Amino acid sequence: MKRKNFTEVTEFIFLGFSSFGKHQTTLFVVFLTIYILTLAGNIIIVTITCVDHHLHTPMYFFLSMLASSETVYTLVIVPRMLFSLIFHNQPISLPDCATQMFFFVTLATNNCFLLTAMGYDRYVAICEPLRYMVIMSKGMCARLVCGSFGTGLVMAILHVTAMFNLPFCGTVVDHFFCDIYPVMKLSCVDTTINEIINYGVSSFVILVPIGLISISYVLIIYSILKIASTEGRKKAFATCASHLTVVVVHYGCASIAYLKPKSESSVEKDLLLSMTYTIITPLLNPVVYSLRNKEVKDALRRAVGRSIS
């Protein structure tokens, strides 16, 4: 279908939180506070893992990569959302919308597979402790990170190319950023193929990591149960608790948002879910890994101690 058969659409307008009326100012303050905390938390994690040699291990290398990815991920979405809460009906051009969607898909996919790499790291640490440093070499860590990012790039190119070859008739996006389904709704033509692509990509990006992480944790639990002492079992499980917490929240929200039947979609539910995985989850990572992780807390104390002295 050629675009010239339809009225040319050059920009979109986000409907966002306009239905909240006068409460948008309150939302702005809340979201800005969360955003600042998210940026500060992730920057602290990246910095502390770089400067403290005790954290120069594969586990914290992956954590710093995840924190970096989450930082850019929020930068792509949240500032424009905050701006639209104050200055309403701000347009976004099609190229800017495509760019936002490209980075959103790339980084969201990257985060999914980084969490998978972290699950594999925990499996090797607990099930193959004597071979840990051999298996999780610098080369292996680099390959896992590059593979995560490369997968994200491929998924983003597939999504954005398919989406922005569609002709658009509508201009109002019933969302606060260029997410896939809200933009797809504005097309003038049948989007069945795009919906199949989206469901296929979403299934791959969500279900494959969930499957791999589940296998890792089945093997981890089996190994932990073979540890004789109760203290040893607690210590082994404690090394996985932070990762498992983030995984449950991250994939829980993503599964509900992108794998639910189309008939169950509603604007209010979609906004709530989107707020969770674009605003809340990026804050969860530094909070969980700093509050539940003894090594990170010790590294923060050493850093504060050095700065005071």
Image: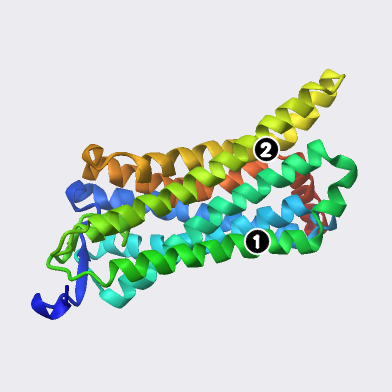
Identify the residue at horizontal 71%, vertical 32% (top origin): 219
Q: CA distance from mark 1 to mark 2?
A: 18 Å
Q: Are marks 1 and 2 in contact (CB under 8 Å)?
A: no
Vertical placement of residue 46 versus 210, above or below: below
Residue 216 — which label?
2
In the image: residue 2, left or right of residue 81: left
Corner quadrant of residue 308: bottom right
Q: Residue 85's spot in the image, x, y percent?
A: 27, 58
Horizontal and vertical percent position of residue 22: 20, 49
Alpha-carbon neighbours of circle 1 within 10 Å: few (<14), some, or many (≥20)?
many
Q: Nearer the viewer, mark 1 or mark 2?
A: 2
Q: Nearer the viewer, residue 88 or 159?
A: 159
Task: Identify which amino acid the numbered label 1 is placed on.
Answer: Val
| Quadrant into which the N terminus falls | bottom left
Image-based side of 160 in relation to 65, left or right: left
Q: Residue at x 43, y 47 (%)?
A: 203
Residue at position x 48%, y 61% in the image: 73
Q: Dividing the image into 4 quarters, which one contains the C terminus?
A: bottom right
Asked whether residue 70 is in view, the answer is no
Callout 2: 10 Å neighbours few (<14), some, many (20+)? many
Q: Quadrant of residue 13?
A: bottom left
Element carrying mark 1: helix
Query: In the displayed structure, does residue 203 sit left or right of residue 166?
Result: right
Residue flagged by tag 2: what amino acid is it?
Ser
Give the residue furthest to the right: 130
- What label sits on residue 145 in the rendered view? 1
- The mark nearer the N terminus, 1 or 2, is 1
- Name the residue rendered at 17%, 69% in the picture: 168
